[in-house]
Image (spheres, grey):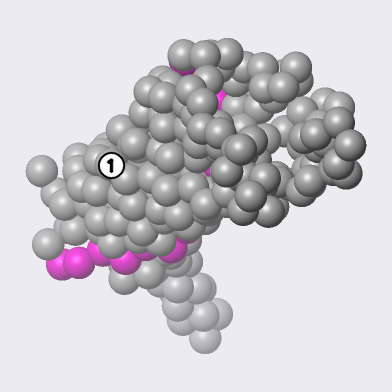
Amino acid sequence: MKRLVFTMALVVFGTALMAQSPGFRAGTRIGIGNAVFISENQAYENQIGKIAFQAGVSGGQQFTNNFGLEIDGLLHFRGAKYTDSEQVSTFGGEEDFTQIVRTLYVDVPILAKVSFGTSDFRVKGYAGPSINFLLYAEEERKFDDPDVDRNNGYINDISSFQTNNLGYVYGIGLETETTGGSIFYVDFRVQEDLRSAGNYNGESFKQRVVGLSVGSKFMR
């Protein structure tokens, strides 16, 4: 009886450790999230969050059933959005406005991955650095009052941001593998700059994005 219980325990344990089959896979990833600026002086405390969007290619080498390496090449639209007010005329009061910063990066995260589960359904965790290249940045100030906005609102290019930066990415996800070795997944991930992304309105800042992404990879 003890031998039977021990054998069954080994089978259950072995099944639980089954994960992604080894090999190289490539595919696509798309994601959506919430982007904010972070500063030591909390200069952007009235942030309401800006929608971030990313899309691109994703590749991964699975070395063993449980350990692998993933590399993405993603276009990443992010930035920040916050509210404030200012006096626009000598005799008038303060006018409320929304400030929107839009940035577009090429992100290249390199992530170590660990996954556990059955052959059909697995949980994974991953983390690693991300090299980010800025393609453009712009700011828009939009006043709540249409008349004030017509005379004082603006859209300008921004040149005070770093053209390249280093960040980190970490997250968890769920994935399933088909009989042909293809992978379909959904991820919750966090991305943040390791160093300042530049200066905005006299404040040094970092960018953070929290979001969800989905994708697929196919055996090559």
Question: Residue at coordinates 86% horizontally, 31% vertically from top-left?
Answer: 90
Q: Is residue 51 left or right of residue 30?
A: right
Along the line of sight, which residue is nearer the eye, 53 or 96? 96
Viewport quadrant of the C terminus: top left
- Main SS class of the magenta portion in the image: strand
Compared to 114, does 192 lie above or below?
Answer: above
Which kind of residue does numbered mark 1 sit on? Gly
| In this rendering, position of residue 57 left or right of residue 19 | left
Q: Is residue 112 left or right of residue 73?
A: right
Q: Which residue shows up at 47% across the image and 15% down it?
A: 164
> Relative to residue 12, is residue 217 depicted above or below?
above
Q: Position of residue 168 (x, y in %)?
A: 55, 30
Is 204 within the magenta?
no
Q: Quadrant of residue 149?
A: top right
| Residue at the spot 31% in from the left edge and 71% down from the top edge | 120
Whether residue 80 appears in this view of the structure is no
Left or right, 143 with respect to 52, comes to: right
Which sits in the foreground, 127 or 93?
93
What span is in magenta? 164-179
Q: Residues within 10 Å of mark 1 (few under 14, many from 20)?
A: some
Residue, x 52% and y 14% (percent of image)? 159
As displayed, is residue 79 above or below residue 204? below
Residue 170 part of the magenta segment: yes
Which residue is most to the front? 91
Towards the viewer: 141 or 212: 141
Residue under label 1, please give it.
56
Residue 111, horizontal then vertical, whole percent: 44, 34
Residue 42 at what x, y percent from top left?
84, 33
